[in-house]
Amino acid sequence: MTKKSLPITGLLSLLTSAVLTLCAAGGAAAATPYTAVSSFAAPGTQQLVSLATTNTDPTGYWTPERMQAAIPGDVLAVKALARGGAPSTASGTVETGPPVKIASAKGGSGSLHQDEDPIDHVGKVFFTMGAFAYVCSGNVVVSDNDSTVATAGHCVNEGPGAFVRNFVFVPAYLNGKAPFGIWPAKALYTTPQWRTAGDIRYDTGFAVTATVNGKHLADVVGASGVEFNQDRGLSYQAFGYPAAPPFDGQSLKSCSGDATKDPINPQFKAQGIPCDMTGGSSGGPWMVDSGRDSYQNSITSYGYPGGPAVIYGPYWGSVIQEAYDSASTS
């Protein structure tokens, strides 16, 4: 078992006839300028990466009004969900391997969610695709570069298609406030299966943020440990920023429960936990057991309208671990 140490520290939600993924509109904050670079395929790796943005001044782009009006990023995942999420052309990589842990230093009534105080390393993700602005949730994870954010694959890449642009992360977002500032991405990573086929089984992405005021993201807000190739059916606490009614996307929520199989689309090989969070929580972290400082082992990917209140996340196996490794060491 491998270990590594680091200081700890979601227009409306889109409903389709079959599925609803969970991103939604967010709030206001001011962004930090950074330098644009172009896209490329990283040498020596299957993970495809797009560097940053063509907009050289996110401060000018990410106005409070744009953040508030951002479209839920689930519209970028609907193609994969509509075709069943696991196309026959996708890679047949077997999700097996030894269990891996990469450690951090610290190791309302009648509802399925609970209100949460802000967590320094959990926040909202904003990005653009074409002429539109979108929003998701994300979490800082332990990494060699001290600058890696885990989120949904459909929050970094169209799946299949282009990488997003103008990606920024707002840690500990609360009521339009950005207490730790706005962190722009300089590189985006996802799995080959999501990037080339939109395979929902591998709907996870990672963003590597630029330094802000000379500091790395994890050094400012801390990071969660991560786990891969673990047993199925674990107990999770999932965090996110739901925005569709009755939520407003302005504060952090969580749901807890034991993971079960998706009975509607078992080919997704996803796991679900009871949760009434709405559009806005897509890309938010699933922490093993309960506790905001435990290991992250999945992200919120999708749910079903009109069905049981359950959110689903992909199994974090060897393929998603490879994407993480590529981002962590970039």
Image (cartoon, rainbow, N blue to C red):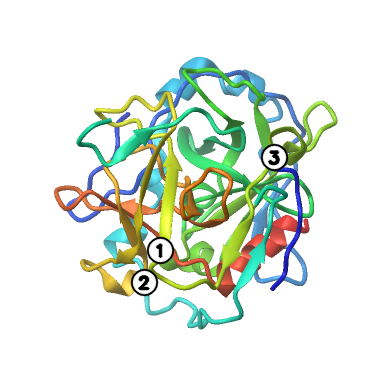
Find the distance from the CA under tag 1 to the CA under tag 2.
Answer: 9 Å
193, above or below 65, in the image? below
Q: Earlier in the sequence, mark 1 or mark 3?
A: 1
Residue 320 seen by the camera = yes
The residue lying at 70 percent from left, 57 percent from top is 327
Q: Earlier in the sequence, mark 3 or mark 2?
A: 3
196, above or below 6, in the image? below
The mark lying in front, picked from 1 and 3, is: 3
325, above or below 301, in the image? below
Q: Position of residue 77 (x, y in %)?
A: 38, 53
Task: Determine which of the numbered discs, if any, sits on residue 222 in the image.
Answer: 3
Q: State the SS at label 1.
A: helix
User: Camera-side residue: 38 or 17?
Assistant: 17
Q: Earlier in the sequence, mark 1 or mark 2?
A: 1
The residue lying at 77 percent from left, 34 percent from top is 35
Q: Is residue 292 left or right of residue 24?
A: right
As shown in the figure, which amino acid type bears the numbered disc 2? Answer: Lys
